[in-house]
Each structure stands twice: as structure tokens, then as C-alpha cells.
Amino acid sequence: MKKKILFVASEFASGMIPFAATAINALAKDDRFEVHCLCVNSGIYSYRNIILQEANPVFLEYPKSKMMKLFYKLWPLEIIKHLSQLEKSINPDAVHFLTGDFTLALYICLNNKRTFYYTVHDLHPHEVVRKTLLGYLMQKYIIWGYKLCRNIIPNLTTSSYFQLKELKEIYPCKKVKYTSFPSLITSLIINGKKMPLEVSGLKEYILFFGTVDKYKGVDLLVDAYCNLTCKSLKLVIAGRGFDIETHNENIIRINRFIEDEEVAYLFKKAKFIVYPYRSATMSGVLSLAYYFNKKVLASTIPFFEDNATLNVVLFKVNDIDDLERKMKSLIFGKNLSVDPTSYLNIYGEGTLINSYWELYED
């Protein structure tokens, strides 16, 4: 008998969309599951062209006015209404909140069920700089919402072994299981042929890809790069976020939303990828580098260490000198060999599906 799963993806950050969409689509194609999903879009951040029809998607739109956005964060009436209707009509074996879904914390508190499942992304919040009091208060509210969901929902899952161990210690009476990290590779990325104008004419470069936040250590990368005596390769920092203070003409900053159709070009032209994170519980960025068979220079945070293959060269976290040394070695073509099976072994669809089957089966 098929397992009926209702997925909820109410958050739409650039990393959350492929995370949720990959898991939803993979299970929807498997004969063991009957999948339904409720997804929230916001402008260019949309699930609409990614989720398969086999997943029986229901799409909602994030409000546009500031007042309605505030109401949405406190009590998202449209989501709650559709979620209640879907639960009644489908009678799912599991309702799985995939994307943090802090806006639904109060609803979950009032309607908690044994069939609820929750994906824990970041047990410990990232270091985020908020420039206004309202931004600071909202960040506190978001963290509170995540914690409330974790505390209430009886079934938890994470894609970080390091975090799994800690969750089991904090919640010894809950079911806490590991599920494979969904690949960030989508059909739009696979088929994308669009060239970002900012890298036009460049044959090769060093690439950082992702939103630029303090915890990702991009400032460390810039310092290490500027210390290099040989700058035969330009450094491309691609992703929306903080501006990087530098007057180095060899550093190209693409501070905007990167379309999925542009990702393939960025990665294919890169000599190697750098992820200088100070911290992170989970991250899907390795899946992108593995898919395009690119060498990765990454910091020694637990998630990268757990998922490192021959494709990864590790440097000591927060150590600019070590980062500089390893970068110089890769620039001169040393240790650039990769294992082409890395992507399939870690991010293969079969591995992902089976981990979710075991989650719901127990």
C-alpha cells in the first residue's frame, strides 16, 4: 500500500527551493509513495516550474504589501486554510514540513499530530547581521518559530550526521532520523545555457557561488586571494548578499539573484570552487560542484568533512594562511583530480528515496 505524504514548503529562499523540490519530485516518481505538496512562491523565487505534476502541487503566492507580509509571518491564513483542507481530503500518513516553516509554528502548536514530520536545517542559527531593529526582532521571531516546531513535532529528520547526534541527545524521546541531503541540481540547471554577462570573455576563474552572508566566510576568501602573489585566475563571487570591500580588479562580484539557467555556465568555466564557510549545519553546495565534476576547496566544518570525497581539498576553518596555501596549489594545477562517481554516490535519487522511505516506515 502506498504511503501518502503531504509536503509543506512555505519558505522560498534560493537554497530551500531546490532542497524541497528535489525531495518532493523524487518521491513523487516512486511507486511506493502518493505525494501531495503545498508550496509558497514569491516572485522569482518560485516552485511553480520545478515541481512535477505527479506531486499534485498546490501553489500559493507570498503577499506583496508590507502589512500583509507581517500578518503572513504571524498567522498565514491562506496556508493554514489550504493545509487543513488537504489534510481532510487526502488523509495523509505523514505531513512533512520541509523548509523550516516558522510561520506555521503557532498553527503546529495548536494542531500537533503524531503524523507531523519536521526537517531540521540549522539547530544553531547562523550568524546574521541585521541593520534595523525590526530586522533584529524578526530574526529572533524566526529562530523562536524554528525552535517551537522542533520542540513540538514528534518526528524529526536532518541531513547532517553531526546534527543528528546532537538532536538525539536533546530529544531522546522523539523519533530522530537521518535523510540524505537532496541535490540542488534541477532540470533548469541541467539544461541551462545562459551566460552571466559579468563573466563574458573569461576562460577560467576561481568561483564562490551562493548567497553572501558572514557565516560563509567570503571575507576570508577575499583576504586570502588578495595575499596571493600570483593572480593568474580571477575570483568570481556569484550570489546576492553583502558587498565585499575590495578594490582588486581581479575580483568580480555578481551581487544579484543567479538564475538557474546561469548556474551551469558558471560552474563549467570554473577551475575550482571555494566554500570558505565559518560555520554551517547543512549545505547543498557540494552537490553542484560534484555534479559538474569540479574540484572543491572547503573549510573543515563537520558537514563538509562528512561529505568530502576525492573531489574536496580541506583547509582549516578560519585559517586564511592555510586557505591561501591550498588555493595556490590548486591554481598551479596540483591535485585537481576528481571522482566522477561522487555525485551519484552521495546525491543519487535512489539513496534519497530510500532514506525517506525508512523515515516514514519506522
Image (cartoon, rainbow, N blue to C red):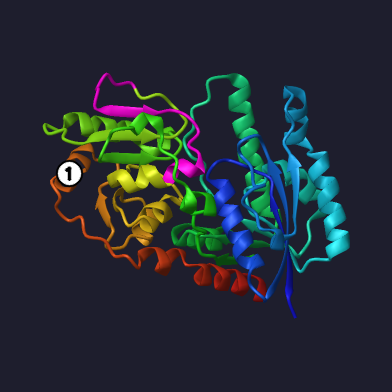
Q: Which residue is mark 1?
A: 331
Residue 86: x %, y % from top left: 83, 57
Query: Is residue 354 visible from the viewing direction of this image?
Result: yes
The structure residue drawn at horizontal position 33% and vertical position 32%, both measured from the top left corner, is: 200
Q: Which residues are magenta?
A: 245-263
Q: Is residue 339 magenta?
A: no
- Which element is circle 1 on? helix
Q: Residue furthest bottom?
A: 1
198 or 12, nearer to the observer: 198
Using residue 41 as the reference point, say whether residue 337 is left or right of it.
left
Mark 1 surroundings within 10 Å by alpha-carbon count, few (fewer than 14), some (14 through 19), many (20 or more): some
In which quarter of the view is residue 195 placed? top left
Tag 1: amino acid: Ile
Using residue 291 as the reference point, say whether residue 116 is left or right of it.
right
The structure residue drawn at horizontal position 35% and vertical position 40%, both measured from the top left corner, is: 208
Using residue 25 as the reference point, say whether residue 249 is left or right of it.
left
Residue 153: x %, y % from top left: 70, 57
Give the total number of marks visible in the rendering. 1
